[in-house]
Amino acid sequence: MDPHRPTWESCWETAGQSDIGLRRANNQDSLAIWIANTEEQWKHRGHLFVVADGMGAHAAGELASKMATDLVPLGYHKLLDRPPHDALAQAVRDANAQIHSRGMASDDFRGMGTTVSALAVLPHGAIIAHVGDSRVYRLRGGVIEQLTFDHSLVWELRRAGQFPAGETLSYIPRNIITRSLGPNPEVQVDLEGPFAIQPGDVFLLCSDGLSGQVRDEEIGKILSILPPQEAVRTLIDLANLRGGPDNITVIVARAAAEPGCPPEDASGAGKPRVPRWVPWVLGLSGIALAAAGGFFLFASRKALAAVLAAAAVACGAAAKVLGRPVPATASPAPDRLGGAPYARKECRPDLEFVTELARIARQLREAALEADWKVTWDQFRAYETQAEAATGKQDYAEAARAYCRAISFMMEELRHQQPGEGETPSPFVR
């Protein structure tokens, strides 16, 4: 085997973070990232990513979302007798039943609920189980697609033909959801996929704390220019700079662009598999045949030699017939499920996007100077200079990348500010 060949371990780059936002007292979002730790686990269950956005008074929302991100991965990995899409849907249904029971057991938690969006990436593609208005996106080739349907009043009315796609009605609250885990003993789970995976594909899961503040095309542009860890941080910063009215949770998973990734052939999916006992039987058959020859030539025990030779031949024949390669039992790909994509946007970085990022960076600089915050200005100015030079060359991807780094750098600096006596605390300090 080529030691430099990409493996299932090295073909995905992932990052995730949950942020309280600027206007909430607690964080009712939760996330889970489960990376396969063996090749066998990758082949049958892949990597799993889950985002949940809880709702309910007191600590009910926190509990509901945490239960979802704990129970869905556990259930998914226990149901090994089912194909992945069935196991994932059942894991969500089982989590709903437990969240509902927990809510019914206490007046403080009664009626608690949570959204859940779960993405499993496997050798044969990506599958999604979804309830609520958290979202899963895929970026490919300068286009971002929303792969989940929002179970919200706005989207349900649009699907029913009450108003055209793209048109919004201000009197319809955007945050009313029509489906969630917990409030009812049973829940309908949407399944989407499988979606074929190409090198360079980027998947994003998020709560509505991000999608409510950052447009789809902006999300796609940021994903296209930054590695996952930086993209997560920048998206959260941008949502906070636009008010941060809700908790913000983001997971990004990128399929490596190196040749051979994702490692579909490395998983063994679809390859013939020889039963493990065959080599042992063939080995014993060879030993028996050698012993038969020894007894015949040197011990003059022809009868015993004949018996051993017959046994060796029989074992060899059985291994040949019964040990024929069988299809691998890697998770089969189901027929296409769901109706994704539900939205699609072009998202290549352009001058308009760069101008918007430059405006944000400038406002951050002015706010820091006015408040006399302590900032490592050399680094911030270096990013701005890099961005301005790239803009002059019309390299908008590089310009946007530098401005994103300037913004995230300044936001990190501002989080560490300690207001002096009589000063107004920074709105970015939690």
Image: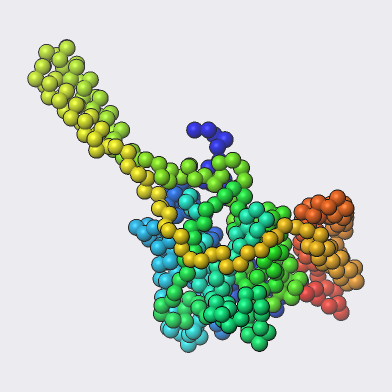
With respect to residue 382, does 164 lie above or below?
below
User: Which residue: 52% across, 44% down?
Assistant: 263
Residue at 43 percent across and 84 percent down: it is 104
> Is 136 or 52 nearer to us in this picture?
136
Number of marks drawn: 0
Residue 362 placement: quadrant = bottom right
Q: Residue at x 76, y 67 (%)?
A: 415
Q: Residue at x 73, y 66 (%)?
A: 237
The quarter of the image holding the C terminus is bottom right
In the depicted structure, whether residue 416 falls above or below residue 108? above
Position of residue 43 measured from the top left corner of the image (x, y, whole percent): 44, 49
From this viewpoint, is residue 406 visible?
A: no
Place of residue 139 in the rendered image (x, y in percent of width and height, measured from the top left): 63, 57
**Of residues 110 and 96, which is closer to you in this image?**
96
Q: Position of residue 326 (x, y in %)?
A: 32, 42
Residue 293 place in picture, x, y as percent: 19, 17
Residue lying at the far left in this picture: please name it. Answer: 303
- Answer whether residue 188 is visible to the viewer in this image: yes
